[in-house]
Amino acid sequence: MTEPKRASRKKGAKSPPVKGYVIDSDDPVEVAKSLASCIPEWGELKQTQRDELVRHSLNSRMRPARAKVAAVTDAETGNSTISPPAKHQASHAIRIYETFATASEDIVFSRLSEILSHFTKSGEDTSTKMSAALAFIAGCNPENEQQSAMATQMALVHDAAMTALGAAKRAEYMDTYEKYSNQANKLSRTFAVLTDSYAKLQRGGVQTVKHVNVYEGGQAVVADTVHTGGMNAKRPEPAHAARDLGVGASMLGHDPQWQGVPVASGEGKEALPDARRSEG
């Protein structure tokens, strides 16, 4: 995107630098002045609309910068090389390592090679597509190499799904349309599965505490709502009626073996029968 022309200012006047429409200033008044100079329709906007644009600009400035890469293809050999862009190489290199949540050079080159292999066949601006994928991965906030690998898959599957949808839209024949539509549907389902698995991986195991309600007459009812998450989460045992729960002053405590059902921390005068069994 080319930078819009800015209105001339009086000699000696200073204004915050403009990067697109994101103003490098925390002062709403200065941001409004800078936006007024680069948005032609600014004078036609209502004050509420101007305030909204100022807020958007301030919010965008506060978002973290993302890593970028430059992909260069040799005309003779057809081989591509990837590296941080020429400007600010060191800062972008650091961001790339953080994007993949690793200190391993091998992981960085492996992930970048996978992304490069995916986009070099698209015939589009490889550098822009790769940088967009890096921004997507960073937005997933991976915490380790495993999570960054899944986030990379999500980025590439998303791109493949959108490519298939675009091909379906441009199809001239029904069989071609159905072919690409089916492929887009499969890729979208895969993306949904990856997203769900990634969320569980980041969330980790969730301990479930069941509530036991003891009603008059000695009937104990165990809530049967279980939420699990994470690949390493321990699955609770099947729900069952609490046994030997005392009626009166006994307080419910947590099972030290974490079976998902609270146990009595004290002994009562009478034992309750099994809530799910009845004789006769």
Image (cartoon, rainbow, N blue to C red):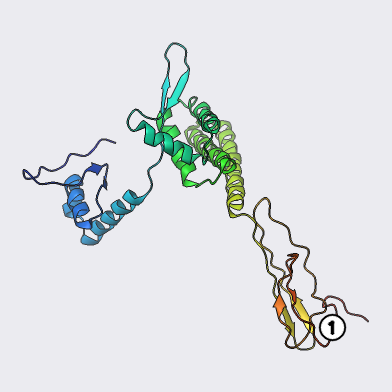
| Quadrant in which the C terminus is drawn | bottom right
Residue 164 on image: x %, y %? 53, 35
Give the residue type that dot 1 points to.
Ala
Q: Quadrant of residue 247?
A: bottom right
Residue 156 on image: x %, y %? 53, 36
127 or 262, which is in the foreground?
Answer: 262
Seen at 41% across and 31% down, the residue is 69
Q: In the shown orientation, is residue 76 left or right of residue 270?
A: left
Q: Which residue is mark 1?
A: 271
Q: Is residue 152 above or below residue 210?
A: above
Q: Quadrant of residue 210?
A: bottom right
Residue furthest top as drawn: 76
Helix, strand or loop at disc 1? loop
Residue 198 on image: x %, y %? 59, 48
Query: From where the camera sits, is residue 124 visible?
Result: no
Seen at 32% across and 30% down, the residue is 87
Seen at 88% across and 79% down, the residue is 278
Q: In the shown orientation, is residue 193 left or right of residue 33?
A: right
237 or 171, which is in the foreground?
Answer: 237
Seen at 60% across and 45% down, the residue is 194
Residue furthest right as drawn: 280
